[in-house]
Image (cartoon, helix red, strand yellow):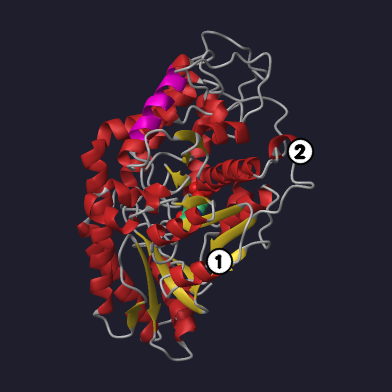
Amino acid sequence: MNSGKTTPEPMRDVALGPLFQTAAAHALRYRSHVAEAPQRPSRDFMAMLATFAAPLPETGAEGPAIIDQLARDAEPGLHAMTGPRFFGWVIGASHPVGVAADWLTSAWGQNTGNHVATPAAAAVEAVAAGWLLDLLDLPRECSVGFVTGATVANFVGLAAARHEVLRRAGWDVEAQGLFGAPPISVMIGDDAHTTVFSALQFLGLGHDRVIRVATDAAGRMRADAFRDAIAPLSGPIIVICQAGQINTGAFDPFAEIIALARAKGAWVHVDGAFGLWARAEPELKGQTGGIEQADSWATDGHKWLQTPYDCGYAIVRHPEAHRRAMTIAASYLPPAQAGERDPSHYVPELSRRARGFATYAIIRHLGRQGIAAMVARHCRVARIIAARVVAEPGIAVLHEVTLNQMLLRFGGDGAGADDLTRRTIARLQADGICFAGGAAWRGSQVMRLSVISWYTTEAEAEIAADAIIAAWRAVKAGANFRDWER
Ligand SMILES: *Cc1c(COP(=O)(O)O)cnc(C)c1O
């Protein structure tokens, strides 16, 4: 690989063709075969470490050869997240149109801090932001920050919340910090996503210093419990709701909660990492009723919208609070005038990737109707899988499947069900026909499925259901555990 030329020079005539074409050929080959390949990696982390481990190279090597080797070495350790039967965690499938736009994003190399530096990237973001508000039917006056994902979108929304509730209490938190500030009451459902607690931790609000509100069987905040919890509170309050519980897909009762919160002058933030996209589908939208009354929302591009990783959106009803929480003006940065928009004003970073291009390209490609059809299809697929597997003795679906998420349990109510469920997950993963992971829910081991890949169709639902049933039957039959239990 290293033919004596050891220190590559910066040259205008560096052979871009072979380099970019090598990468494109690998991408094409990988994406063309991922549907047939096992829906799991064939090598684990330790094996991958062994593959890549090497001393720091003293000398250089040719670009295309490095790309060849990288593809060859990495592929056994890749998970089929872009496959049609990958149901692990909650992971979108990097739509090819988004991938192509993302390649251009890399090639163009735009630092997307402000609109003077990169008019195209800033303008596309401004347009895509408007499209997102339209798709999700949120107040059109909202500001939108393009971030890495819902974790940071939650952070941004809660930073705006922290700013505003303290400003109303006469405190400038950006200037003075939290030392000596009026205390903020933070209310959150018992089944909120862990990353919201991370956001609270980053903001100095504390992940334990919260008022946890009891939830129902599907993980929704109970409105009666919320009413009791907020009644004695006064002063600055932040309420955190959820659209799309990670296990069940359930939505908080937004209308009731937000009305109670409003009466106390609270800021309401919604974690809608994937669930907010129910608003893009007319029949599912009803489940989110009242959500548009909130003050801020976090959602992902890289889950239901299928943008390549990484991409999330922080949406705030009060652009002034959003900007003040995120920006500190610097003299060398040109100020934005009315109608202009600096991408960095709405996110924690100054320098960052031009995430707007992939968002723009995917929305442009699918359109409102294509996105609605995809969301509807995923929910239909979830219902098909649930209906198929529940007909098999010993498999239970633990909740009504109202969105794209689903919990399964194997082996009835007996003491052995945790173990049988764990074994069924291991068996399913070893078979590699589809991938689902495990989770703990209400103290029990469950199999969790998230139907959110662009490639998943009704036909894949049948294959996946058959694979789950086959894995369970194999476990029940006590077949040769040792072969796959490692
Ligand atoms: C995925 C998820 C998050 C975190 O989002 P990232 O994109 O991983 O940062 C937060 N909340 C919910 C409900 C999620 O599903």
At label 2, counting other C-alpha atoms closer than 10 Å, the crowd grade (few under 14, some 14-19, many 20 or more) is few
The residues bearing labels 2 and 1 have C-alpha atoms spaced at a distance of 29 Å
User: Residue 58 or 274: which is nearer the viewer?
Assistant: 274
Quick check: 53 above or below 58?
A: below
Residue in the image at 42% along x and 42% along y: 301
Q: Which residues are magenta?
A: 120-132
> Which element carries disc 2, helix, strand or loop?
helix
Q: Secondary structure at mark 1?
A: loop
- In the picture as drawn, the residue positioned furthest to the right comes out as 180
Q: How many marks are shown on the rendered structure?
A: 2
- For disc 1, the marked residue is 231
Residue 467 sits above or below residue 346 on the image:
below
Q: Residue at x 61, y 27 (%)?
A: 350
- Where residue 93 appears, as percent x and y from the top left, is 37, 46
Q: Please name the amino acid that badge 1 sits on.
A: Ala
Residue at x-position 49% and y-position 34%: 146
Instruction: Characterize the local packing of mark 1: few (<14), some (14-19) or many (20 or more) Cα atoms within 10 angstroms.
Output: few
Whether residue 439 is visible here, answered yes or no, is: yes
Q: Main secondary structure of the magenta part?
A: helix
Left/right placement of residue 347 relative to residue 484 reads right
Q: Give percent across and percent down for residue 346.
A: 54, 32
Mark sitting on residue 176: 2
The spot of residue 460 in percent (x, y) is 25, 58
Image-based side of 156 in relation to 20, left or right: right
Residue farthest toward the top in the current orientation of the protein:
12
For this view, does 348 lie left or right of residue 418? right
Q: Work out which quarter of the rendered image holds the N terminus and state it.
A: top right
Image quarter hosting the C terminus: bottom right
Q: For the residue marked with disc 2, what is the amino acid?
A: Gln
Q: Sequence order check: which comes first, mark 2 or mark 1?
A: 2
Q: Is residue 130 magenta?
A: yes
Q: Foreground: 234 or 19?
A: 234
